[in-house]
Image (tube, rainbow, N blue to C red):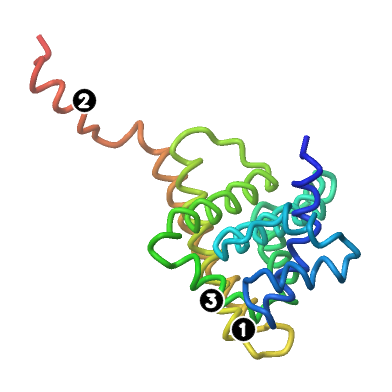
Amino acid sequence: MTSPLENLRRKLSLVVAENAVFDGWTDKAVIAAADQLGIDRDQARLAFPDRPADMVAAWIEGVDAAMVEAFPPEKIAAMKVRDRIRNLIWFRLETAAPAREAMRSALSILAMPQNVPLGLRTGWNSADLMWRLAGDTSTDYNHYSKRLILSGVYGSTLLAWLDDDSDGWQETAAFLDRRLADVMRFEKLKSSWKSGSAHRPSITRFLGRLRYPAR
């Protein structure tokens, strides 16, 4: 259960990002968002972080929350896994679109050495959330490899999107489809490798036999 301050921060987050296009990731953006939403300025300051990196992280969390609300289980259940991931990524782009011009500065802020851990953590959390919404329940190494790969796909798609002036972001859509096709090929290869593991020579078994020869 989220606290009132957390709810207020989420309510502010997307609007703060829109104002960051003009005011940067500053207190001015928070005040402008509070005025737009009819929220007391002091309450807004209390609820929303004042450090630029934390403001960006709060925005990302706001996009995460909007994504969860937009994709209840019954909506996503009928989709194939690839379509689930694609729709989730595309929703994030559409949600971030009003603050698109603030995205470059947001990425630059998170790329600063002191903010890299925060940037990695927020990226990982978003990838984890997308996979969980897509129905992934893996707990082995696949849990980590899927999230690492999706973080890379989403990050590269964001960069392509920022430079895309095509109608309806057609170039970004094509880029995303190519990246997802690469991921699906990798998953199929990984699956076939795993299914055939019983028939491949095992280095562990081989070394074990060297140490303990069969009698």
Which of the pair 65/198 is nearer the observer? 65
Q: Closer to the N terminus: mark 3 or mark 2?
A: 3
Which residue in the protein does label 3 denote?
Answer: 159
Task: Check the picture and name the quadrant holding the N terminus.
Answer: top right
| Disc on res. 205 | 2
**Badge 2 local density, few (<14 within 10 Å), some, or many (20+)?**
few
* Closer to viewer: mark 1 or mark 2: 1
Query: Residue 196 falls in which quadrant of the image?
Result: top left
Q: Are marks 3 and 2 in contact (CB under 8 Å)?
A: no
Q: Label 3, secondary structure: give it.
A: helix
Residue 130 image point, x, y percent: 64, 51
| Residue projecting furthest to the top | 215
Alpha carbon separation for disc pair 1 and 3: 12 Å
Residue 171 image point, x, y percent: 62, 84
Q: Residue at x 80, y 48 (%)?
A: 7
**Badge 3 local density, few (<14 within 10 Å), some, or many (20+)?**
some
